[in-house]
Image (cartoon, helix red, strand yellow):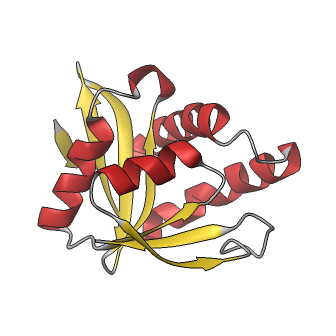
Amino acid sequence: MIRAITTADYSQLMKIWESAVLNTHDFLKEEDFKYYKEQIPGYFEHVTLAGFEADGILVGFMGVAEGNLEMLFIHNDYRGQGIGKKLIQHGTYHLQVTKVDVNEQNIQAVEFYKHIGFNVLGRSELDGQGKEYPILHMGL
């Protein structure tokens, strides 16, 4: 089930984020992981958040701003079950998602977005925080 996120969910979002990032972002330096972990909660209030519940437990979420998928994270225990695709479908239909920026080094994510119809439109050498993690700009 997809539902809106409230501030009461933020601690669970962080658990999902950490599980997802530890299992998909093996290219991140430890100090950058800690940096992003501190920064992520500050982004929640700037995006429209939607979460996916399985058996009454929040296991995935996305954040959208101005048609851009700013974040999509699925708890590692629930990856590969179609949750990301369902959230993207919800985002494209209800939140007008048409683009996403993804870490080039996160091959699984790049392939996932390509599989559901996104194409690479451009590339940046640095991420949005100015760190040396190349970003692919993708769109539908």
* 78 shown above or below 96: above
Quadrant holding the C terminus: bottom left
Give how far across and how far down residue 38 sits, in percent: 71, 53
At 27% from the left and 53% from the top, the residue drawn is 116
In the image, 49: left or right of 94?
right
Question: Closer to the camera, 16 or 140?
Answer: 140
| The N terminus lies in quadrant | top left
- Quarter of the image for residue 103 reads bottom right
With 108 as the anchor, is 5 left or right in this view?
left
User: In the rendered image of this protein, does residue 107 appear above or below residue 135?
Assistant: above
Q: Is residue 84 left or right of residue 131?
A: left
Identify the residue shown where x is 40% and y is 43%.
Answer: 8
Left/right placement of residue 66 relative to residue 134 reads: left
Residue at 60 percent of width and 38 percent of height: 24
What number of labels is visible? 0
Does the image show residue 86?
yes
Q: Is residue 6 visible?
A: no
**Frontmost residue, 5 versus 123:** 123
The extreme left residue here reads: 93
On the image, the x and y values in percent for residue 55 come to 23, 18
Q: Is residue 11 above or below residue 32?
A: above
User: Percent from the top left, x then y, of residue 90?
Assistant: 17, 55
Query: Which x, y percent locates residue 58?
Result: 34, 32
Q: Quadrant of residue 80?
A: top left
The residue under the point 28% across, 73% down is 98
